[in-house]
């Protein structure tokens, strides 16, 4: 069985990842838990 068959989706947010595995609740991982720095970007577009 391959990991691609188990993982439904991966969502990348500025400070965490959300991984959905078929048949289970969504797992949330902080960026630092997987060895990444948190993003300095918190928004999209120009502030108005």
Image (tube, grey):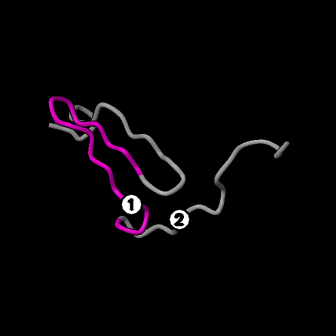
Which corner quadrant holds the N terminus? top left
Residue at position x 49%, y 57% from top?
Answer: 15
**Element carrying mark 1:** strand
Magenta-drawn segment: 17-33
> Residue 11: which numbered mark, if any?
none
Q: Position of residue 30 (x, y in %)?
A: 38, 60
Residue at position x 27%, y 46% from top?
Answer: 27
Q: Badge 1 is on which residue?
A: 30
Which corner quadrant holds the C terminus? top right
Q: Please, is residue 41 above or below residue 11 in the view?
A: below
**Element carrying mark 2:** loop
Residue at position x 41%, y 69% from top?
Answer: 32
Q: Please, is residue 18 above or below residue 35 in the view?
A: above
Q: Badge 2 is on which residue?
A: 38
Q: Position of residue 24 (x, y in %)?
A: 16, 35
Q: Are marks 1 and 2 in contact (CB under 8 Å)?
A: yes
């Amino acid at each position: 069985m391959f990991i691609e068959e188990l993982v439904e989706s991966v969502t990348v947010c500025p400070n965490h990842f959300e991984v959905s595995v078929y048949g289970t609740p969504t797992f949330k991982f902080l960026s630092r838990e997987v060895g990444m720095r948190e993003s300095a970007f918190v928004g999209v577009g120009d502030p108005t």
